[in-house]
Image (cartoon, grey):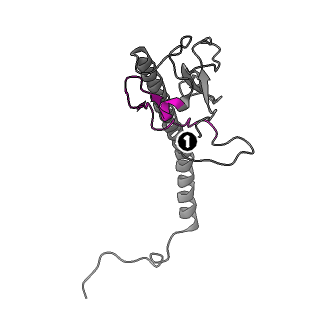
Amino acid sequence: MLPCSCRLSPRAGRGFSLVELLVVLAIMAVLATVAFPLAELAHKRQKEEELRVALRQIRDAIDAYKRAVDEGRIARAADGSGYPPSLSVLMTGAEDARAGNGGKLYFLRRIPTDPFAPTSAPGEPQRSGVRDLQDPRWGLRSYASEPNDPRPGEDVYDVYSRSNDVGLNGVPYREW
């Protein structure tokens, strides 16, 4: 038999003591209290980025529609501003005045959703994915309305979030 300088204590095979388990649980609780707020913050940042992207897509489509009207590709009403009459026109397409075969110009594949808008109104069934074409969840501003008091009208000059929440930068989402 070889001499061994290490001897197993009689307690070695019995597991953890209650105090050790309580210390580990206390450490895990402290880590969890730090992790949950950070996870919520990361989730809110992600939703804010989705809002930025959605607003950029819709606003770019509105600007492209206006450019097409100014270039004569879309017929303009005599008293019209040249902006789309609704958001749905950006997706369903507008008659291309230059195409002789009744072609259409499309500006969006789908209308992006507002990540801060509720998915359904009270009493309304839950919907997922693409919103209805006449979905009122985006706030609409017409060309004729004042910048400080956006109101819908005969055209869509701009869109904004209808959420009452405030962003991490301190600016309400309605003002983005």
x, y (%) of residue 142? 59, 17
- Judge from the rendering whether residue 35 lies leftward or rightward of residue 9; answer left or right: right
Local secondary structure at mark 1? helix
Of 41 and 2, nearer the camera is 41
Q: Is residue 105 magenta?
A: yes
The quadrant holding residue 79 is top right
- Judge from the rendering whether residue 135 lies leftward or rightward of residue 70; answer left or right: right
x, y (%) of residue 113? 54, 37
Q: Is residue 79 above or below residue 87?
A: above
* Amino acid type at image mark 1: Glu
Q: Which residue is mark 1?
A: 40
Q: Is residue 47 magenta?
A: no
What predominant SS class does the magenta segment belong to? loop
The residue under the point 42% across, 14% down is 70
x, y (%) of residue 24? 53, 58
The quadrant holding residue 152 is top right
Q: Quadrant of the N terminus?
A: bottom left
Q: Residues within 10 Å of mark 1 (few under 14, many from 20)?
A: few
x, y (%) of residue 143? 57, 14
**Numbered label tally:** 1
Outermost residue, right side:
123
Outermost residue, bottom side:
1
Q: Which residues are magenta?
A: 89-118
The residue under the point 65% across, 14% down is 149
